[in-house]
Amino acid sequence: TAEIAARKTIVLGTNQHPNTTEKMLDKIQAEDDGEPIETPGLDPKYKTIEIFRASDGFEDLRLATEIWENEGNKVPHVFLLTNGNLAMRKARAGFSTGFFGCAGYKVTDNSGFAAVEEGIKASIAAKADIVVLCSSDEEYAEFAADAAKAIKSANENTLVVVAGYPKEIIDSLKAAGVDEFIHVRTNVLDTLYTFQQKLGVML
């Protein structure tokens, strides 16, 4: 549902606090190995209600990532470039970890870089597919545009994301190369589908 896709309704372990070490393919195999249970001689009198899982969309994302890895590809790597205000960078790093964990991506968190340049160098060295800037809106105005340009100049295919929505500078950050903004109003499911498509992870 839309509420689950936007994480307004929480499905613990799926769209909130996902267990990134859990493998869905193992669970599917275990179910396939089980014996079906049938009750002979019973014919249902009423039409049964069609059952669906509200978390299907998120499970499809995780499954696509696992299949992608099993086919010999690299799991998408997310690098958190944390800098500045301690409370804000930690909160936004935690949000980002949960966000991308929903798709089964590998997330590298950091305790915080003393200098933005240091974080940029580390993100480039990590060869991450996605670099997420985690700081306060005020500090984004000081460094986010330059950071996006530097990361893109090293590899134009790296996706640069800002955790938050600094509305006063959105247009300038987009012009500098920021690909996406993730925040509490983001439709998590739709946005992760977009990332899967950009990274070539087929659903």
Image: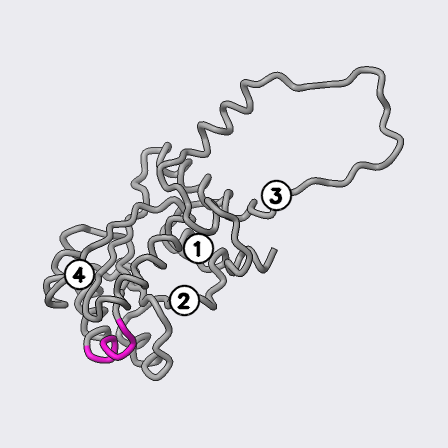
Q: Nearer the viewer, mark 1 or mark 3?
A: 3
Q: Residue at label 4?
A: 112
Kind of residue indicated by mark 4 = Gly
Instruction: Compare marks 1 and 4 and give the one earlier in the sequence.
Output: 4
Q: Does residue 158 belong to the magenta stretch?
A: no
Local SS, label 2? loop
Q: CA distance from mark 1 to mark 3?
A: 19 Å
Q: Residues within 10 Å of mark 2 (few under 14, many from 20)?
A: some
The residue that appears at 37% across and 68% down in the rendered structure is: 181
Q: Residue furthest bottom?
A: 168
Q: Residue at label 3?
A: 53
Instruction: Compare marks 2 and 4 and give the one earlier in the sequence.
Output: 4
Q: Residue at label 1?
A: 192
Q: Residue at label 2?
A: 183
Residue 52 at x, y = what percent? 65, 42
Q: Residues within 10 Å of mark 3 (few under 14, many from 20)?
A: few
The one nearer the camera, 71 or 53, is 53
Instruction: Compare marks 3 and 4 and give the one earlier in the sequence.
Output: 3
Kind of residue indicated by mark 3 = Arg
Local SS, label 3? loop
